[in-house]
Image (spheres, rainbow, N blue to C red):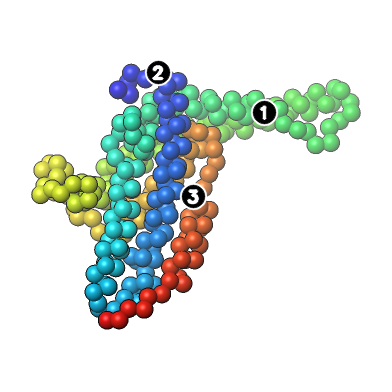
Amino acid sequence: MFEQLTLPERVKTAKEKTERVIDHLHYLLALHENNAIVLYSPTLSSQIPTSYAANAFNVFQRGLHQFEIVRLCALWDKAELDKENIPTIIELIAHNDVIESLVQETASHWHDQVGCILNPSDDPDLHALEIDALKRSNERFGNEQAQKARVELYKAIHDSRAILNSPRLQGIMNLRDKHLAHSLSHTRREKAGPIAPMKYGDEREVLNATLPIVEALYCWVNGCSFSFEDSREIDRKNVEALWNVCSFNIVS
């Protein structure tokens, strides 16, 4: 189905999917920062004594963690045109013509820049030289950015495929398929061979590896420079503002 798309359709669809993946990752980061306290710190659990209430807290704790796993797996699910995930974007751009189209788009952005000359000369001949120098400078920078786009897009493709083939992601996906999305005695992955079980913290490792890939895609597919670190810091402050002042008064 990807092969049937024209080059402009591939580029347009990749841009749209990347915008949506950015939104999905924002929500996933918010979930992750909540779990950093709810699951991975004693902030709440240390307040819960052995009690009937502890059973309810355990359900809440597991549910929040499991939903993070589900949302992370959705970002790395199978590539299909109706899915808003990373493998779909990679499948759309993993073609030399598409890469070169995005590279040329990056170069053209800078080549077309007119710019502003500070303290321009009053002499028309000198001013013309200043404009020519600025144009050549923009062209050089555009060519440098184009080469950077080419390198980072191929790296994003390589790194994405490495994550897709990693035992860590396979273990996370297998848990999602077997126990969260379905109730299965055996998954297709397990029938094909042994799958290492997911460990606590695996989701954090995959998420941290995901962020620079999506940042690179957003930069060179959509032409938008972006860092998730600011969003993550905001999420962390929001989470701390709630859970660090939340207290339980439970009779054991």
The reply to whether the C-beta atoms of the residues labelled 2 and 3 are less than 8 Å apart is no
Residue at image location 49% in from the left, 66% down from the top: 241
Judge whether 114 appears above or below 71 on screen.
Answer: above
Q: Is residue 132 left or right of residue 178?
A: right
Residue at image location 78% in from the left, 33% down from the top: 117
Residue located farthest toward the right when viewing the structure as drawn: 122
Residue 158 spot, x, y in % from top left: 36, 38
Q: Secondary structure at mark 1?
A: loop
Q: Is residue 190 left or right of residue 116?
A: left
Q: Secondary structure at mark 3?
A: helix
- From the viewer's perspective, is the residue at label 1 or at label 2 nearer? 2
* Disc nearer the start of the sequence (1/2): 2
Q: Quadrant of residue 22?
A: top left
Residue at image location 40% in from the left, 29% down from the top: 93
**What kind of residue is marked 3?**
Phe
Q: CA distance from mark 2 to mark 3?
A: 32 Å
Q: How crowded is the residue under tag 1: few (<14 C-alpha within 10 Å), some, or many (20+)?
A: few
* Disc nearer the start of the sequence (2/3): 2
Q: Quadrant of residue 142?
A: top right
Q: Which residue is mark 3?
A: 228
- In depth, the one of 100 and 57 nearer the eye is 57
Judge whether 159 appears above or below 197 on screen.
Answer: above
Q: Which residue is mark 1?
A: 113
| Tag of residue 226 | none
Q: Is residue 125 left or right of residue 85?
A: right
**What kind of residue is marked 1?**
Gln
Q: Which residue is mark 2?
A: 6
- In depth, the one of 15 and 113 nearer the eye is 15
Q: How crowded is the residue under tag 3: few (<14 C-alpha within 10 Å), some, or many (20+)?
A: some
**What kind of residue is marked 2?**
Thr
Residue 196 spot, x, y in % from top left: 19, 53
- In depth, the one of 172 and 141 nearer the eye is 172
